[in-house]
Image: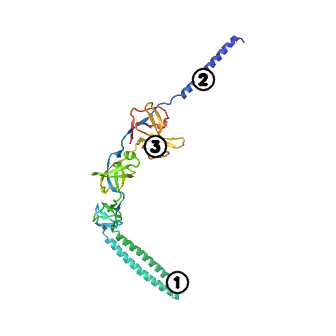
Amino acid sequence: MTHGSLRPVHGALLLALLATTLAGCKETGHQATSETAPPAVRPVRAMTVEPMSFRMGNSVTGTIEARADADLGFRIAGKLIERKVDVGDRVKAGDRLARLDDQDQRNALRSAEATLASARADLVQARNEEARKKELLANGNTSQALYDAALLELRTADAKRVAAEAALQSARDRVGYTELLADRDGVVTATGAEPGQVVEAGSMVVRVAQPQEREAVFNIPETGIRAAPRDPVIEVALAGAPDVVATGHVREVSPQADPVTRTHTVRIALNDPPDALRLGATVTGRLKQPPAPVVEVPETALLTMTGQDGVKRTAVWTVDPKDRTVRRRPVTVRGTVPDGPVPDGSVIVTEGLSQGDIVVTAGVHSLSDGQRVRLPQTIETAAAQ
């Protein structure tokens, strides 16, 4: 074979090798480009943290009530013929407050007394009969069956006597139930029945409160309850005399809002209240110290992250306004534990956010640190209470 015939073959091989090399270079370049491509810019919803005063920072109006009171009523039904106290009267334990018509109960008492007397007479007769039959049995003048019958009559008569005594005691108790007595020292704050009225067993006739422990009671909006600082000190002043002041702490917050006003009842335990803060007085309340800064954000803004120590923590995405990139920031949420469930609706962030921070509120589970985002034209506001 001549050299001239080899040239076309070598040329074809050279062209095929060149084409393979170029294709490999293009494929490698494509892979490098896809690997180094930056993450896509994701649209998100966000809100800005702005300051706002706590709702109870302004004064709210409430009343003074007793911490402990009791609705007193009769244990039996009947016609009320006397009520000896009115609202505002002071009573002592054992004082008679009201009285029912006791004619029916006294008739039942006399009947029970007669029944007991009859049962005791039957018992005496049965005891004597048993003694005679026992003596006759010992002398052989009667049978064992007749003695057993006498013994049975004795035991039956004794049981009837016990039942009659119990019925008599019950009748005496019912006579006593026609009088309503105070079981504690206190002040009458309400009445529920007037003389001549027929009352049911257990219905309130007189309400007695203990004025030694007084509380201020307020109705606070739901937003104010959620944003309240921990263990706030409340200053309570008499509405007609602002110089009459007492301080206290929150003792109880009603877990359910009023269905009409949508407010929660807050009870403030007062520390050594002055005598001028009487039961029923109108008072105003306000926070004595400034509230701790907290932020209310939607539940959708929270995500759970696991640290290097394996502990789960709550975090949010914050947006850098300059380059529009997100950064993960740990936060502390009120009312939840780090590895516990996130509550429904809005949540209160007590630590980790400050004024001016932009917080992502939707799409938090599809972001990564440093990723660029596109913010909406209008950004909502997260109230910093």
Residue tagged 3: 332
The one nearer the camera, 120 or 143, is 120
Q: Give the residue at x 51% y 29%.
A: 38
Disc nearer the start of the sequence (1/3): 1
Q: Dot 3, crowdedness within 10 Å: few (<14), some or many (≥20)?
A: some
Please tell me whether mark 3 sits on a helix, a strand or a loop: strand
Q: Give the residue at x 37% y 77%.
A: 114
- State whether residue 218 is above or below residue 109: above
Please tell me whether mark 1 sits on a helix, a strand or a loop: helix
Q: Position of residue 342 (x, y in %)?
A: 46, 44
Quadrant of residue 30 within the rendered picture: top right
Q: Nearer the viewer, mark 2 or mark 3?
A: 3
Q: Position of residue 35 (x, y in %)?
A: 55, 29
- Give left or right: position of 244 versus 361: left
Q: Distance between the Cα atoms at labels 1 and 2?
A: 124 Å
Q: Give the residue at x 31% y 53%.
A: 63
Residue tagged 1: 144
Residue tagged 2: 24
Disc nearer the start of the sequence (2/3): 2
Amino acid of disc 1? Gln
Q: Position of residue 239 (x, y in %)?
A: 28, 51
